[in-house]
């Protein structure tokens, strides 16, 4: 194998690592956001449960006020009943007392039902709090691990970029330009092996016998007839 091709292969390996590390550094914040989104879902579930409980408490308070108002009316009607001297008026007041007592019974029944709902909602709040706490633990751990991974990858990337400067410094300028163009075009496969069946392992197209022979001999740089990748055998 030609020495300059060996140098290009060494550079390509570094460049592929650089690409991998950069791609991972892009993915890490995305993974962190996905973890936070899971936390946001549980946070919203807890918020919804608390809102439902608070609304139910408002309804209970309204019923309590209505019960108090009607009991006050009953007291007033009883006083009027004791004060009246007319039988007809006394009877009507008595009927109103009975009607208001019925309303109070209905309201108190409703209040009991709302209190049962409150018990269920308190349970939902407890469950939502437990789910959130569990998810919070997982998310905190995951984010911390991702932060550690990002730190490691940044360190690795810095080292690889330093090594790249050294590896690239020994390659001729024209060949370096060709390699860079092919690396970008062929998605990291600028220098590739040509198989014994004369197949380019970058584009998988069979090269001509002359191209294959040139790659084998190493007398000059050999390029794939189809994709232009630098070949070695």
Image (cartoon, rainbow, N blue to C red):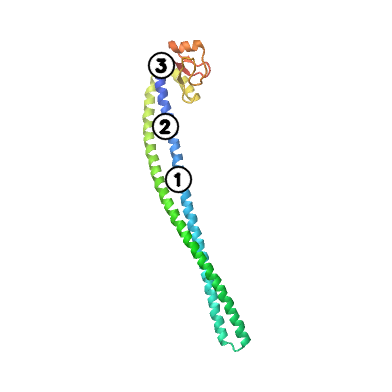
Is residue 56 something that shows in the picture?
yes
Q: Label 2: few (<14), some or many (≥20) within 10 Å?
A: many
Counting residues from the N terminus, which is met first, the one under dot 1 or under dot 3?
3
Q: Quadrant of residue 85?
A: bottom right
Counting residues from the N terminus, which is met first, the one under dot 2 or under dot 1?
2
- Dot 1 falls on a residue whose secondary structure is helix
Q: Which residue is mark 1?
A: 36
Viewer-side label of 2, 1: 1
Q: At x 50% / y 58%, what residue is drawn?
A: 51
Q: Which residue is mark 2?
A: 21
Counting residues from the N terminus, which is met first, the one under dot 3 or under dot 2?
3
Residue 141 x/y as whole percent? 38, 44
Q: Which residue is mark 3?
A: 4
Q: At x 57% / y 84%, what residue is drawn?
A: 81
Residue 84 x/y as whole percent? 59, 87
Residue 83 x/y as whole percent? 56, 87
Residue 86 x/y as whole percent? 61, 88
Question: Whole-Å distance between the Cαs marked 3 and 2?
Answer: 26 Å
């Amino acid at each position: 194998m030609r020495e300059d091709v060996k140098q290009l292969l060494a550079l390509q390996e570094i460049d592929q690592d650089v690409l991998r590390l950069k791609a991972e550094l892009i993915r890490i914040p995305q993974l962190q956001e996905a973890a936070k989104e899971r936390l946001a879902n549980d946070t919203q579930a807890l918020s919804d449960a608390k809102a439902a409980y608070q609304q139910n408490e408002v309804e209970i308070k309204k019923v309590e006020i209505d019960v108090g108002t009607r009991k006050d009316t009953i007291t007033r009607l009883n006083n009027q009943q004791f004060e009246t001297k007319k039988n007809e008026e006394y009877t009507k007041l008595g009927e109103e007392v009975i009607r208001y007592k019925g309303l109070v019974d209905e309201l108190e029944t409703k209040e009991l039902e709302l209190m049962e709902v409150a018990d269920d909602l308190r349970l939902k709040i407890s469950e939502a709090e437990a789910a959130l706490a569990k998810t919070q633990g997982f998310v905190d751990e995951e984010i911390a691990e991702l932060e550690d991974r990002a730190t490691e990858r940044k360190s690795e990337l810095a080292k690889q970029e330093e090594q790249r400067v050294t590896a690239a410094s020994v390659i001729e300028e024209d060949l370096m330009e060709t390699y860079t163009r092919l690396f970008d075009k062929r998605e990291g496969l600028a220098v590739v092996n040509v198989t014994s069946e004369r197949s380019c392992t970058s584009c998988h197209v069979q090269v001509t016998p002359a191209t294959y022979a040139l790659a084998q001999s190493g007398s000059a740089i050999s390029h794939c007839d189809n994709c232009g990748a630098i070949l070695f055998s």
